């Protein structure tokens, strides 16, 4: 009995050795058992060094020059070349002053916070310097308005022409015109007259890069609106700044609408605001 058990144990061990030998032989022959071979070996596996990542290459060559568009049309920009100031016709002054009288009267009674934002008159000397810097003859109605108020002190709760155009000071008129011409001259022919023109005179700013201007290309001072991301627009605006002042005064006095449906309201801080069209 014991002899039989011993023979069985020897057979079992021999069988295991045979099986392992066969597995090893098949693996080595097939070439797909590298990991198994290493595991069966009594030697430690070789140390595998990971590949070194490629270093990014940095070019020392100068970038190609940026080509700026060259204007082949007249942009109208003549900074520092404005003509001497001419007297404002009395009829223009009377009409502008009458519109401002109505606006100021309503502001003092209903929106004193905005009334306080109106700056004192600009001097003739300051207006003359502004005309020289802009390089364009300022429309007579703009000069008359600046002689009444040299813009407003700030934006926000200051007085604004509808919907949110704050009358520009002499300094803002000159500064905005300079910036617009600098951008215009770097953009190419397609922007001249479409996005801006050197004979546009800024008269009000929105605080967001847009505003109102008077078009002096034909010397008529046509009122329009510029959009710094789009094109100029004349469609919804009255022909002149004086008409816009008069329509604003009427809207304030009657509570009516102006410029496509904007209606005046008074805030809790007693400042003028404009309701969006419904």
Image (spheres, rainbow, N blue to C red):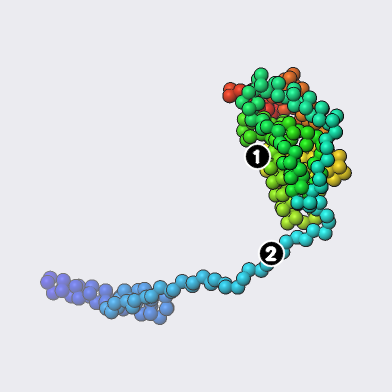
> Where the N terminus falls, by quadrant?
bottom left
Res 23 quadrant in image: bottom left
Foreground residue among 188 and 179: 179
Residue corresponding to mark 1: 207
Foreground residue among 96 and 161: 96
Q: CA distance from mark 1 to mark 2?
A: 31 Å
Foreground residue among 56 and 120: 120
Q: Residue at x 77, y 22 (%)?
A: 250
Of pointers 1 and 2, the one earlier in the residue sequence: 2
Residue lying at the far left in this picture: please name it. 2
Location of residue 150 in the rendering, given as x and y in whole percent from the top left corner: 70, 35
Res 111 quadrant in image: top right
- Report if residue 268 is visible in the image: yes
- Report if residue 212 is visible in the image: no
> Where the C terminus falls, by quadrant?
top right
Q: Residue at x 85, y 45 (%)?
A: 217
Res 92 quadrant in image: top right
Q: Residue at x 75, y 38 (%)?
A: 124
Along the horizontal axis of the image, is 2 left or right of 18? left
Do the residues under discs 1 and 2 have CB atoms within 8 angstroms? no
Along the horizontal axis of the image, is 148 left or right of 60? right
Residue corresponding to mark 2: 66
């Amino acid at each position: 009995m014991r002899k039989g058990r011993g023979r069985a144990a020897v057979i079992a061990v021999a069988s295991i050795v045979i099986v392992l030998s066969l597995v090893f032989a098949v693996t080595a022959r097939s070439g797909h058992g590298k990991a198994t071979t290493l595991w069966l070996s009594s030697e430690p596996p070789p140390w595998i060094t990971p590949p070194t990542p490629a270093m990014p290459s940095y070019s020392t060559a100068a970038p190609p020059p940026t080509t700026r568009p060259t204007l082949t049309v007249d942009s109208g920009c003549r900074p520092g070349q404005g003509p001497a100031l001419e007297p404002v016709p009395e009829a223009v002054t009377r009409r502008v002053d009458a519109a401002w009288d109505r606006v100021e009267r309503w502001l003092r009674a209903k929106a004193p916070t905005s009334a306080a934002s109106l700056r004192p008159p600009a001097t003739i000397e300051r207006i003359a310097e502004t005309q020289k810097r802009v390089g364009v003859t300022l429309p007579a109605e703009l000069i008359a308005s600046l002689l009444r108020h040299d813009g407003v002190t700030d934006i926000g709760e200051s007085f604004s022409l509808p919907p949110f155009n704050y009358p520009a000071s002499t300094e803002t008129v000159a500064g905005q015109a300079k910036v617009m011409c600098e951008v215009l001259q770097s953009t190419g022919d397609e922007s001249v007259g479409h996005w801006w023109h050197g004979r546009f005179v800024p008269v009000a700013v929105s605080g967001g890069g847009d505003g109102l201007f008077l078009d002096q290309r034909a010397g008529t001072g046509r009122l329009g609106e510029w959009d710094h991301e789009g094109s100029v627009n004349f469609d919804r605006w009255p022909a002149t700044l004086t008409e816009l002042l008069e329509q604003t005064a009427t809207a304030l006095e009657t509570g009516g609408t102006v410029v496509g449906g904007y209606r005046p309201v008074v805030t809790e801080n007693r400042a003028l605001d404009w309701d969006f069209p419904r």
